[in-house]
């Protein structure tokens, strides 16, 4: 690639950032870093009616949490700023005027009522109304193609509302190229004359998007499949301005866990998983779950998102961000939609849980459990090291380890029936003697003394080990019994066995 690669992620600040958006940002980031390029954040806030206070901050925080921070954007390295479209609105009108001057766009004065009447008239005849070559100069529609120059000027000076529409060509075949989807042919006769500039003085997405991508020297536009129908218009706009178009790549949809339809917040609510990177509180007070607050590690989120549509071509599934940058290739992105699998996301998180330092996990664990406030974090870290293999989230730790911190006050009924037999009290009394006799209280010494006594006396291991575990834990679960005894200490071990006997 001769030019420096420059890509952009251009979300609208209309609410929380869906993980589909995060996936788009991630693929842009990976592509930019792979080719030594720039990753740009641009806020597309031309639709002021849908603007939500705080949404831009949420977008930035989400990208930072995922570790895919932008190189350029609002308040950061503003070489091509400003990066909010609302702050660039004064420059779009000149480009709209340029298209009118070149004959590639025109003024349209049709009211909403007139357009509605046209739609209804077409529907009554079983047709679909499209504002384009077919009817734009027939006289029923009010635009500068049928009005004289003087009439058009008079309407504008009188303050009549107008929009500027693109004049899509007639009887042409567009040959488009998409990095992921290959060659695409479009008959221009099916295109409508999209509005480029609105009566409120703001550009539509289509005009602002093209102008900004050109002025910011974007070389590759990597975006969601939902923008594929706009590709023809965008290429025509580049041609109309006489600009070199960037290369385009349209990413596949992220599908529901069933594989049918686009993943939505409702799917997450229904099936119990988040669809947003961070927790989000809407203006009406509604709270939506986030991956961060649900206990996911950012590395796990990035890893599973990378696999929603991309395939490395090998059996490898665990990739650090650095490995993803090295291996990422748009040619290996699928055209077909990628099914979201909530269980697979947990699988990734479980893996990354095992990579975390026990002390860091212990600090997180301590922060969410008031019962641990007075307990040394180094002790908690030792406990975490024994139980994290069974955990997917830090939230799982308490259920897996509570007995390291508090003695059982009740015993699992099913486990008791299985573990407590005639003679159990005598056996446990002997175990107390063995524990008390173990001066150097280590895992190895406890194991040697108790297992040696079991073997010498030809007692079934279950007759000793099951009630012993029940005494320590309150159930037949947990890590190695001797690890538990060592951790809670001799006095507490004896006390718990005595409680069981009692």
Image (cartoon, rainbow, N blue to C red):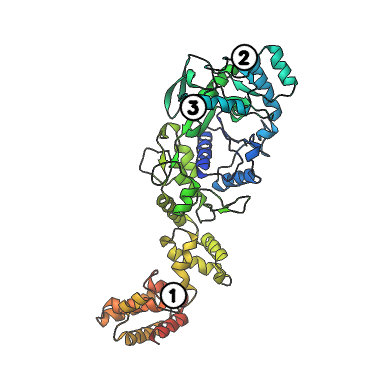
Task: Please state, as top left, top right, bottom left or bottom right, where the C terminus lies in the image.
Answer: bottom left
Precedes in sequence: disc 3 or disc 1: 3
Q: Looking at the image, is mark 3 or mark 2 earlier in the sequence?
A: 3
Disc assigned to residue 145 = 2
Residue 221 spot, x, y in % from top left: 53, 30
| Camera-nearest residue between 260 and 113 | 113
Q: Residue at x 52, y 17 (%)?
A: 134
Label 3 neighbourhood size at 10 Å, few (<14), some (14-19), many (20+)?
few
Q: Is residue 54 left or right of residue 169?
A: right
Q: Is residue 337 above or below residue 217?
A: below
Quick one: 270 or 326, which is closer to the camera? 270
Q: Is residue 488 visible?
A: yes
Between discs 2 and 1, the one toward the N terminus: 2
Alpha carbon distance from label 2 to label 1: 88 Å
State the separation of the CA atoms marked 3 and 1: 80 Å
Q: Quadrant of residue 350?
A: bottom left
Residue at the spot of label 1: 486
- Nearer to me, 234 or 9: 234
| Label 3 vs label 1, nearer the camera | 3
Most distant residue in the right direction: 157
Residue 104 x %, y % = 60, 16
Q: Of the numbered discs in the image, which one, if any, rests on residue 123?
A: 3
Between residues 246 and 442, which one lies in front from this camera angle? 246
Percent across and percent down for residue 16 are: 57, 46
Q: Using the rendered view, name the quadrant where residue 193 is placed.
A: top right
Kindly check if marks 3 and 2 are in contact, taking CB atoms under 8 A apart as contact.
Answer: no
Label 3 to label 2: alpha-carbon separation: 25 Å
């Amino acid at each position: 690639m001769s030019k420096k690669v420059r890509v952009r992620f251009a979300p609208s600040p209309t609410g929380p950032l869906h993980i589909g958006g995060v996936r788009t940002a991630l693929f842009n980031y990976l592509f930019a870093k792979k080719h030594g390029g720039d990753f740009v954040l641009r806020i597309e806030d031309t639709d002021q009616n849908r603007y939500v206070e705080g949404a831009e901050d949420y977008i930035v925080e989400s990208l930072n949490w995922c570790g895919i921070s932008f190189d350029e954007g609002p308040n950061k390295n503003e070489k091509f700023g400003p990066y909010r479209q609302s702050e660039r609105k004064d420059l779009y009108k000149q480009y709209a005027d340029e298209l009118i001057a070149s004959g590639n766009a025109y003024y349209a004065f049709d009211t909403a009522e007139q357009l509605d009447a046209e739609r209804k008239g077409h529907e009554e005849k079983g047709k679909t109304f499209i504002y384009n070559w077919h009817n734009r100069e027939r006289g029923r529609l009010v635009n500068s193609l049928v009005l004289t120059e003087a009439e058009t000027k008079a309407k504008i000076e009188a303050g009549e509302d107008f929009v500027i529409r693109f004049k899509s060509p007639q009887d042409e075949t567009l040959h488009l190229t998409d990095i992921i989807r290959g060659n695409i042919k479009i008959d221009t006769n099916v295109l409508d004359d999209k509005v480029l500039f609105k009566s409120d003085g703001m550009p539509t997405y289509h005009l602002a998007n093209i102008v900004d991508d050109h002025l910011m020297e974007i070389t590759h536009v990597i975006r969601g499949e939902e923008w594929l129908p706009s590709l023809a218009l965008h290429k025509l706009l580049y041609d109309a301005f006489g600009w070199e178009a960037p290369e385009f790549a349209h990413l596949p949809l992220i599908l529901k866990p069933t594989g049918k339809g686009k993943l939505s917040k409702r799917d997450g609510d229904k099936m119990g998983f988040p669809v947003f990177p961070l927790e989000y509180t809407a203006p009406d007070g509604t709270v939506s779950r986030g991956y961060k607050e649900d206990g996911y590690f950012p590395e796990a989120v990035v890893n599973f998102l990378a696999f929603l549509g991309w395939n490395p071509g090998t059996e490898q599934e665990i990739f650090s961000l650095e490995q993803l940058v090295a291996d990422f290739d748009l040619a290996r992105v699928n055209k077909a939609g990628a099914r979201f699998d909530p269980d697979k996301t947990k699988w990734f998180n479980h893996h990354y849980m095992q990579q975390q330092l026990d002390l860091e996990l212990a600090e997180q664990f301590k922060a969410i459990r008031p019962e641990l406030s007075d307990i040394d974090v180094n002790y908690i870290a030792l406990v975490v090291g024994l139980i994290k293999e069974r955990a997917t989230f830090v939230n799982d730790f308490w259920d897996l380890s509570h007995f390291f911190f508090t003695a059982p006050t009740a015993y699992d009924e099913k486990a008791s029936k299985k573990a407590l037999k005639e003679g159990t009290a005598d056996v446990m009394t002997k175990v107390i003697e063995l524990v008390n006799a173990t001066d150097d209280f280590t895992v190895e010494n406890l194991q040697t003394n108790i297992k040696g006594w079991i073997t010498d006396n030809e007692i079934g291991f279950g007759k000793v080990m099951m009630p012993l575990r029940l005494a320590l834990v309150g159930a037949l679960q947990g890590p190695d019994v001797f690890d538990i005894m060592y951790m809670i200490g001799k006095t507490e071990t004896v006390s718990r066995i005595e409680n069981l006997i009692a």
